[in-house]
Amino acid sequence: MKAKIWRSFVVGLVAVAMLTLSACSEAKKEQGTQSGALDSIKQRGELIVGVFGDKPPFGYVDANGANMGFDIVIAKQIAKDLLGDENKIKFVLVEAANRVEFLRANKVDIIMANFTKTPQREEVVDFAKPYMKVSLGVASKDGTISDVAQLEGKTLIVNKGTTADFYFTQNHPNIKLLKFEQNTETFAALKDGRGDALAHDNTLLFAWVKDNPEFGVGIKELGERDVIAPAVKKGNAELLEWLNSEIDTLVQQKFLTQAYEQTLAPVYGEDVRAVDVVFE
């Protein structure tokens, strides 16, 4: 009996040891992947960046199938500074709700999909230094909704997983939310009357109402002013450090202002100043 008990004890110890070694091996493998992030990208010869495909003028796909917009211009410059060629980049289209998962699953190196930095998101991804300023806004027919109190008893349209979704869910649970995955679905729902108003980044709404003058941004700024920044997988310290230095360089070289003038100024016109949107 004692021999059987001893054998069971030994077998248990071996099993625990094997599990521990396996976990350590996986941890070291993951650590190695994170610490060699820049080398991996350089060996691959391509930077993989998650972007929006339906959020003009920040990230969208034009009639020729090319990725265009403010985020795209900055991403290409990042690829140029890292790999020596702005064309050494692969764009992967993401939705607001799956940006974190794409980083976790190593489907992308960086998320550049108008990603607002929030405390909740900082728990699951690492944000680099910001390149853009943003607040929430609310658009409605003729801009008639100018106060959150007017949304009581009405339907507000938002994108799943966005700061607008989080803000109204936490702060105004009595307001009915109609949620969609894609921006195209969200704005289509507003236009065909499925909702009374739409909450989104004010920088996007300012651009959208230019093309849809029957709507207006009645609430131009809501909640705290936030920032938009590139994001990398949690713990990817090497890529994060490089990105922080890169953003500093882009600010010093006034590249962000140039990108604004190229992509956003033609849309905003005189209504918005570069200093209100980008870091200079």
Image: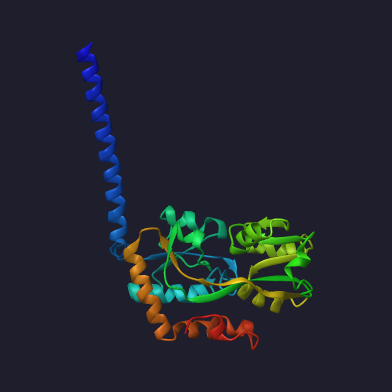
Observer able to see residue 3: yes
From the viewer's side, name the closer residue of 60 and 150. Answer: 150
Q: Is residue 69 above or below residue 24?
A: below
- Looking at the rendering, which quadrant does residue 14 occupy? top left
- Quadrant of the snapshot with the N terminus: top left
Q: Residue furthest top?
A: 1
- Judge left or right: residue 52 versus residue 202: left
Residue 42's x, y, as percent?
30, 66
Q: Residue furthest left?
A: 3
Task: Find residue 209 and report its horizontal and vertical position in percent.
Answer: 70, 76
Residue closest to the eye, 51 or 231: 231
98, above or below 23, in the image: below
Q: Quadrant of residue 44?
A: bottom left
What is the quadrant of residue 143 in the picture? bottom right
174 lies above or below 205? above
In the image shown, does 174 or 181 lie closer to the viewer? 174
Q: Position of residue 87 (x, y in %)?
A: 41, 72
| Left or right placement of residue 240 versus residue 95 in this view | left
Question: Does the rendering let one see residue 191?
Answer: no
Q: Is residue 104 left or right of residue 94?
A: left
Say which residue appears at 72% left-offset and 64% top-offset: 188
Task: Name the side, left or right, on which 241 lies relative to 95.
Answer: left
